[in-house]
Amino acid sequence: MTVNGAGAAERDAEKIWRALDGFRIEVPSWGFANTGTRFGKFVQGGAATTIEEKFSDAGQVNALTGASPTVALHVLWDLPGGVKDVATIRELEKKYGVRSGSINPNLFQDQEYKFGSIANPSAEIRGRALAHLLDSVEIGRALGSKDVSLWIADGSNYPGTQSVRRRIEWMVEVLGATHAALGADQRMLVEYKPFEPAFYHTDIADWGMALELARRAGPKAKVLVDTGHHYQGTNIEQVVAWLLHLGALGGFHFNDRKYADDDLTLGSIDPYQVFRIFHEIVSAREDERAEVAFMIDQSHNLKGKMEAMVQTVVTAQELYAKAALIDQVRLAELQDACRLVEAEECFRGAFWQDVRPIVREWRVARGLPVDPLKALAEGGYVERVTQERSSRNARSVSSYA
Ligand code: PSV
Ligand code: MN
Ligand code: MN
């Protein structure tokens, strides 16, 4: 394929191939485990219950899609022994051909975090939360993984029961100490969420709070945007544009939702929103884009875990390919001239284009299955692991929180 003298179709293909070659999205270990709602957990025969099974599943998703070479780990769920478990993880990385990605501390499950972790009024509990964060930094360093990804569930349920302002100071202190422990190649990502589990105030409720805490912590702290963590109607792509502008966007947790933090598969409800977010990334400067980690954060309660994950990665690739099709130069000209309808058509024309034939060609050229979901269905992996895992799944249900 050549750029010079190439027709529009060839230019489109070239753009898409380049975009796909550079596109990576991390899968979460917890996306392969049994999950449910706060009302109950639904057991799937093929769900992963051990860290080895999670690596095996992640390896399979990467083999089918070529786009997910790393798996996010949740410290308490995947490395209950802390740093001591690093050697096991290293073995699994070799065996299944996927590396450890972001390290997710767990500051929400322990009984002592009932009134908060890093914002708990008890200095002793804050100290233990910090110790867990420092362990997580150490795990990340030992595994050579770049990001320690923090979601802080702290908050309160009733007005007047906690001092919002003193809690800010406590968080600043702990996050500063965590930042100080980061290695040269490490970052910490600060995730926000408006509510749940807390229902009156959440200590890091939106991107402004996350940004300020990240800034106060230091230059290696960035903001993580989980697409499910906004009020309805929030213009998420505008948040993304601002964070890019400020050099503060560290990464994403992708999922979709209809109501709140539903953790549905990407693009299942509003693919146009994902396209709009990707447009902000694609139109950013190369150095800004390099800083943005794409991760999946989903909970597949009704769909098969493997099918849902492959479907998500494929959807992400297709929507990213669509965003790459936008003629950025032309769009900027139309925007500057305020030719509104033409600008809008230039933008959404890319969204409506069926990129799947080109994505299929790319898959073949890269030695990947032409249709990953079909290859999964025909490959026998799900049947095999269901047979191997079903008796254990029937007996015990792995914890999700
Ligand atoms: C919280 O809702 C969240 O999005 C955080 O990223 C957690 O780490 C993840 O879900 C798993 O509970
Ligand atoms: Mn998340
Ligand atoms: Mn969430």
Image (cartoon, grey):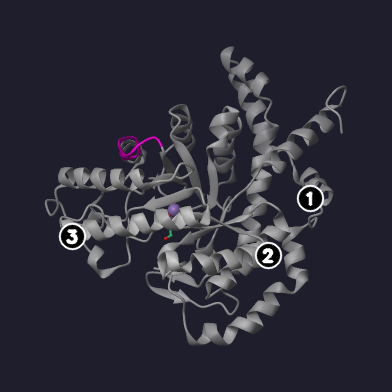
Residue 2 placement, left or right of 329: right
The mark lying in front, picked from 2 and 1, is: 2
The amino acid type found where label 2 is placed reads Gln
Q: Secondary structure at mark 3?
A: helix
Q: Is residue 171 visible?
A: yes
Q: Find the distance from the CA under tag 2 to the CA under tag 1.
A: 16 Å
Q: Find the distance from the CA under tag 3 to the CA under tag 2.
A: 43 Å
**On screen, 22 above or below 269?**
above
Q: Residue furthest top?
A: 337
Quadrant that contains the N terminus: top right
Residue 99 placement, left or right of 36: right
Residue identified by numbered label 3: 124
* Sooner in the amino-acid sequence: mark 3 or mark 2: 2
Residue 174 placement, left or right of 264: left
Q: Residue furthest left?
A: 160
Residue identified by numbered label 1: 363
**Place of residue 160 in the rendered image (x, y in percent of width and height, measured from the top left):** 11, 51
Is 73 covered by the magenta stretch? no
Q: Which mark is residue 60?
A: 2
Q: Which range of residues does the magenta coloring cover? A: 213-219
The mark lying in front, picked from 3 and 2, is: 3
| Residue density around tag 2, few if under 14, some if 14–19, many if 20 or more, within 10 Å | many
Disc 2 vs disc 1: Cβ atoms closer than 8 Å?
A: no
The amino acid type found where label 3 is placed reads Glu
Q: Secondary structure at mark 1?
A: helix
